[in-house]
Image: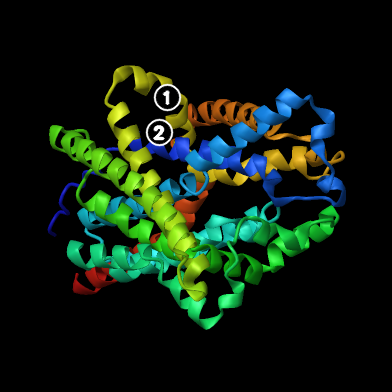
Amino acid sequence: MQQPLPFSKSPRIDVVDALRGFALMVIFLIHCISHFAFFPANSNSDISYYYPDWFNMLDKVVNSILFFLFSGKAYAIFAMLFGFTFHLQYANQQKKGEKDFGPRFLWRLSILAVFAVIKSVFFPAGDILLLYAILGVFLFIVRKWSDKAVFMVAIFFLLQPTNWILSIVNPHTISGVTTEGVTSGIMGIDFPEYIRRNITDIKMAFNWWIESGRFSQSAGLFMVGLLIGRKQLFVTSEANIRFWNKILVIFLVLLVFLRLLKIGAGAVNPIPLFQQTVFDVLHLWQNFILTIIWVALFYLLYQKETFRKWTSDLRVYGKMGLTNYVFQSVLAAFIYVPIVWYSLTPYCSVITDLIIGFMLFLLQVQLSKWWLEKHKQGPLESLWHKLTWLRSDRELTVRVDSVIIKNSRES
């Protein structure tokens, strides 16, 4: 019998774990500011009443800076790393001799959809987990395509075709969609009704994904992450350091150009039918550019030993990305949703939310360290892995039984 070739799994890239942890932390803080989409009836009261004027002014400044730097960028980093992780899984299975990891990946996406349902108890439609479970099909489709073809697909999705089509087909829905579009349907309701709507109102979340442009942009970012994986651009090397330095400079220039373009678009006053679409798409492109800037900057800083030490907790946090992402909502629910006690949502300012979010983040980091001292993966990561290969174990048993039967007949 021919012996199988030795399998060498691709080494874990620490910068990816740290970058994922960074994105997860920022997503958590942004979600805390939005109170995890729970807005009880009295949350419309003016919270500035509880704080001095200087604090309220500082609160507005912090909110503006935070949303400009991170809102729409952290989830984009997360999406890019989803595509990158798919490449690693696909490449590792090829090294093992797996003919095609694609069908297994579709099964894996269906499991992710179940996790999304679990998370939807505390966040509408499971947030991005359900979106990724749907959009992951595009990774399956392009898995064998050339780099050039995948790059063209990325460009297509990043041009935001759904926004342009929607502006023609149904222009009345284009109104500068924000997160309020998702949460407006669940304001002023009690906790049981909040859970029911979160789980069942998939249409509300899907409409927001389309109208906000997140559907197209996430698909494009999947492709970008896939290409980064194929080109091994997260591996530490002199060539990659030069590459990310060039990307950083180019995208900083693009950011300035885009800001000027947005100002010019406002002065020219585009055709009314496309006016809002133009601004929405320019905003999405700005988010994409800032996302690439964050990734390039993070990679370059990670080459410094001091920065690696500072981000060691982020690396631990990122290794348990799925577990920490799901349980972010569970932890925050005890603060913002009236499960055990009354919701603190009506009384929390942006700065208060940041303090709460950061304290819960530190708690999750400690729990992650404790868990990873005894296990190789987080609990949900381990479960996801076992369920992914559940049918593989059965198939192996069938193959072994067939070989035994065949050998017994020959003898």
Q: Residues within 10 Å of mark 2 (few under 14, many from 20)?
A: many
Q: Quadrant of the C terminus?
A: bottom left
Q: Is residue 136 visible?
A: yes
Residue, x 31% and y 41% (percent of image)?
252
Tell me the amino acid under the disc marked 1.
Answer: Ser
**Helix, strand or loop at disc 2?**
helix
Q: Where residue 231 appears, x then y in whole percent?
A: 19, 49
Residue, x 42% and y 54% (percent of image)?
262
Q: Is residue 193 left or right of residue 253?
A: right
> Residue 193: which disc?
none
Q: Is residue 68 left or right of residue 298?
A: right
Front position in the image: 206 or 232: 206
Q: Where residue 384 appears, x then y in whole percent?
A: 49, 52
Residue, x 43% and y 60% (percent of image)?
265
> Residue 18: which disc?
2
Residue, x 21% and y 68% (percent of image)?
149
Mark 2–mark 1 distance (CA, rounded to whole Å): 7 Å
Q: Is residue 13 visible?
A: no
Which image quarter: residue 53? top right
Q: Where residue 210 appears, x then y in whole percent?
A: 53, 68
For residue 187, above or below residue 110: above
Tell me the amino acid under the disc marked 2.
Answer: Ala
Q: Residue furthest front?
A: 267
Mark toward the start of the polypeptide (2 vs 1): 2
Q: Where residue 70 appears, x then y in whole percent?
A: 50, 41
Q: Which residue is mark 1?
A: 312
Q: Residue furthest bottom?
A: 169
For residue 214, above or below residue 234: below
**Helix, strand or loop at disc 1?**
helix
Front position in the image: 111 or 26: 26
Q: Are the residues tagged 2 and 1 within 8 Å (C-beta)?
A: yes
